[in-house]
Image: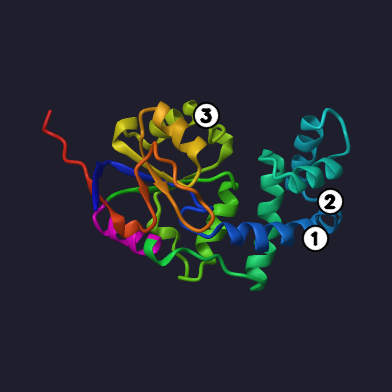
Amino acid sequence: MSSITADAVLLDIEGTISPISFVRDTLFPYSRDRLKDFVSTNLASPVVQDILTQAEALADGGDAVTALLDWQERDVKAPPLKALQGLIWESGYRSGAFRSPIFPDAFLAVKQWKAASLPIYIYSSGSVQAQLLFFEFNVEGDVQPLFSGYFDTTIGPKNGASSYLRISEQIGASPGDIVFFSDNEKELQAARAAALQTVHVVKGETLYHPDFLGISDFCDVAVARKEHSPA
């Protein structure tokens, strides 16, 4: 077992603490099949209008809905798409159409870290709204209280080192005192470039990258709160 000391844990969601298949086979089809009707039904909503305005700007004046559908088909991490998906997924969660899964070993680790007073943050390409829904309507119940904060791509792209530096500033911890767990090697490379500690989570379809500490089970790594000497 590997041991790490840190002041904070930063977690990716998809492929790290939850199966990739949930987003790919459940959430994406759900929003894809309902996107046009949802926009049409909620056209008077200021939130939806703002999303359409952002999408039109990103599409250089093209049709917003067409752009949103294209981005979703190509899995483009466009902020207006992520915001709209979050709204559509909320309707699915609240109707009981699905519940979000979490790997049992990841859930156990999160509970242990929380009990040890180690703050845990989420950084996902899904909007903060979608993240909150993921943890509120979870198979384990409402697990939002386990987490100290949430970040999405509005803080910056996940493959950009500057994003992790901004997260470090907002958390109030030195980059080297944060440990980031992800299944994505590009995200890990960016986090490492920002001086974060990194752990490669290798589950399901993920291939291990030898440049990083890799785990297939969260029980394979122990994370303890770092002790700081008195000033």
Instruction: Please name the predominant secondary structure of the magenta segment in the image.
Output: helix
Q: What is the image's colouring? A: rainbow
Q: Amino acid at mark 3?
A: Gly
205 relative position to 51: left or right = left
Quarter of the picture containing the C terminus is: top left
Quick one: label 1, few (<14), some, or many (20+) residues within 10 Å?
Answer: few
Q: Amino acid at mark 2?
A: Leu
Which residue is at a point 47% across and 53% down the rendered structure image?
16
Q: Amino acid at mark 1?
A: Asp
The tag earlier along the polypeptide, 3 or 2, is 2
Quadrant assignment, res 7:
top left
Where does residue 108 sit, x and y in percent of width and height? 34, 64
What range of the chain is rendered magenta? 106-117
Q: Nearer the viewer, mark 2 or mark 1?
A: 1
Q: Is residue 72 magenta?
A: no
Where does residue 173 sit, x and y in percent of width and height? 32, 34
The tag earlier along the polypeptide, 2 or 1, is 1
Give the Cα separation between the discs numbered 1 and 3: 32 Å
Q: Which residue is mark 2?
A: 43
